[in-house]
């Protein structure tokens, strides 16, 4: 397993590298980072994406207008850290301090692009990984029935070494509870296990050293091990988990009553990814190998029995969905080699989506075939997405993509793993690739 850097663990847990080479006041747009390929960004204004999400991102990650008035410079270019600090010392904003948007502008200019360096090595492949919400913990799930939780703030020390129970093929997904005291892990089985990771013991062997309670997602008539779980996520209040499965369904499990509370026959193929849209828990996003992203409203599902809406635009299966957390925007990664940004207010009905299917190469299989060159320029006739990001490669496994952290970057970036052993970072607003960072010779699969 690799991380971007192991320098200065005692101070930060990671090191940051400059996003661009700065002049005293404004960037010149060039980059110079060891081991990182630079992608020259076009000379576009910040809000080059003509959509509300561009303005929201600007509000959360752009500096105070008065800080732009320090010294000479070109309008529309990022304000340098030197200029930001000078403006703060001169109290140009009238606050006497940086606002959260000012902090995001400064931190968003420094990305963890040095490295990678090896911090741990296991006898089997790492399939999934996950940072905690505050970035202090990192969870990695391996094919050899192993899950390790690393304490980032303590030099990536192994805080919990979990020996998983009833694994079939691999750990397909994990999710940390909001309070970081519990972890659920899934496999190609309808039984999901939950383990207390807040206990003092470092090693956790299922039902030997600690109890790994099994949560049964199967219905009474499904039989044992009749399907597998590809995706599982905690709700923001920690009371429920939602799962996507190989039987084309979405499941919601109530942890307080310890029983399955909802099953939706959601798609016509494997449901590879699910998540709650926001902290209310009412809306659920799902993505499937049927190429569709769907929005489900639990408040009206029983009356209609249908999704609240469908979002068309991808030409191949969906591998991952990440919510912006506002109940409005999310991104999806797809086997059509693209990431798309969605606004659920543009969603269509199921009937409309069925009338406008996109072209597909049905003989193509991403597990062992390269993506057909002739398909790279194909477009969906009813693409409802806000923006599309291309350059990375989605092959062999369900590669993930995420918004960058809201607290440090204002979610101004999208980052993803890739089959070509690289991590790609895209500018959300200008849909351009900012960095391509090379890892080892294997695909970057469980990136987060």
Image (tube, rainbow, N blue to C red):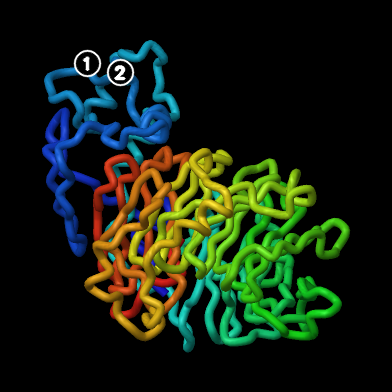
Image position, residue 172 (x, y; %): 57, 75
Q: Does residue 257 lie above or below 95 as drawn?
A: below
Residue 230 visible, this angle:
yes
Image position, residue 266 (x, y; %): 65, 63
On residue 193, which mark appears? none
Q: Badge 2 is on which residue?
A: 65
Q: Is residue 52 left or right of residue 378?
A: right
Camera-side residue: 350 or 155? 350
Q: Secondary structure at mark 1?
A: helix
Camera-side residue: 378 or 388? 378
Determine whether label 1 and label 2 are within 8 Å by CB: yes
Characterize the local packing of mark 2: few (<14), some (14-19) or many (20 or more) Cα atoms within 10 angstroms. few
Q: Does residue 213 lie above or below 20 as drawn?
A: below
Residue 78: quadrant of the picture: top left
Q: Badge 1 is on which residue?
A: 69
Image point (49%, 48%), residue name: 330
Characterize the local packing of mark 1: few (<14), some (14-19) or many (20 or more) Cα atoms within 10 angstroms. some
Image point (44%, 81%), residue name: 121
């Amino acid at each position: 397993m690799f991380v971007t850097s192991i320098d200065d663990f005692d101070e930060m847990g990671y090191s940051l590298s400059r996003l661009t080479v700065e002049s005293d006041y404004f960037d010149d747009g060039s980059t110079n980072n060891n081991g990182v390929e630079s992608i020259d960004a076009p000379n576009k204004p910040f809000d080059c994406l003509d959509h509300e999400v561009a303005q929201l991102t600007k509000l959360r990650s752009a500096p105070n207008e008065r800080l732009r008035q320090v010294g000479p410079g070109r309008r529309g270019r990022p304000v340098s850290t030197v200029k930001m600090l000078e403006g703060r010392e001169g109290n140009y904003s009238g606050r006497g301090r940086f606002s959260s948007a000012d902090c995001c502008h400064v931190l968003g200019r420094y990305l963890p692009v040095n490295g990678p360096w090896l911090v741990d090595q296991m006898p089997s492949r790492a399939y999934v990984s996950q940072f905690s919400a505050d970035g202090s913990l990192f969870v990695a799930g391996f094919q050899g029935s192993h899950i390790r939780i690393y304490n980032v703030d303590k030099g990536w020390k192994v805080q919990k070494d979990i020996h998983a129970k009833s694994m079939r093929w691999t750990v397909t997904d994990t999710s940390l509870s909001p309070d970081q005291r519990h972890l659920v892990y899934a496999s190609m089985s309808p039984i999901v296990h939950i383990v207390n990771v807040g206990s003092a013991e470092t090693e956790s062997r299922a039902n030997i050293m600690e109890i790994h309670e099994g949560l049964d997602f199967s219905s009474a008539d499904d039989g044992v091990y009749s399907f597998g779980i590809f995706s599982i996520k905690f709700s923001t209040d920690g009371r429920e988990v939602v799962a996507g499965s190989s039987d084309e369904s979405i499941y919601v499990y109530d942890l307080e009553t310890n029983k399955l509370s909802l099953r939706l026959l959601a798609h016509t193929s494997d449901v590879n990814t699910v998540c709650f849209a926001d902290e209310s828990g009412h809306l659920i996003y799902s993505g499937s190998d049927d190429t569709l992203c769907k929005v489900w409203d639990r408040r009206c599902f029983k009356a209609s029995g249908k999704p609240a809406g469908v979002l068309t635009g991808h030409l191949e299966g969906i591998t991952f969905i990440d919510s912006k957390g506002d109940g409005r925007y999310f991104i999806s990664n797809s086997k059509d080699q693209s990431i798309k940004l969605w606004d659920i207010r543009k969603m269509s009905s199921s009937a409309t989506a069925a009338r406008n299917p996109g072209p597909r190469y049905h003989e193509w299989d991403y597990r062992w075939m390269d993506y057909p060159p002739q398909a790279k320029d194909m477009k969906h006739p009813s693409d409802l997405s806000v923006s599309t990001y291309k350059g990375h490669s989605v092959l062999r496994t369900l590669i993930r993509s995420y918004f960058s952290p809201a607290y440090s970057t204002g979610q101004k970036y999208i980052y993803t793993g890739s089959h070509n052993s690289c991590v790609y970072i895209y500018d959300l607003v200008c849909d351009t690739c900012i960095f391509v960072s090379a890892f080892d010779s294997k695909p970057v699969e469980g990136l987060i």
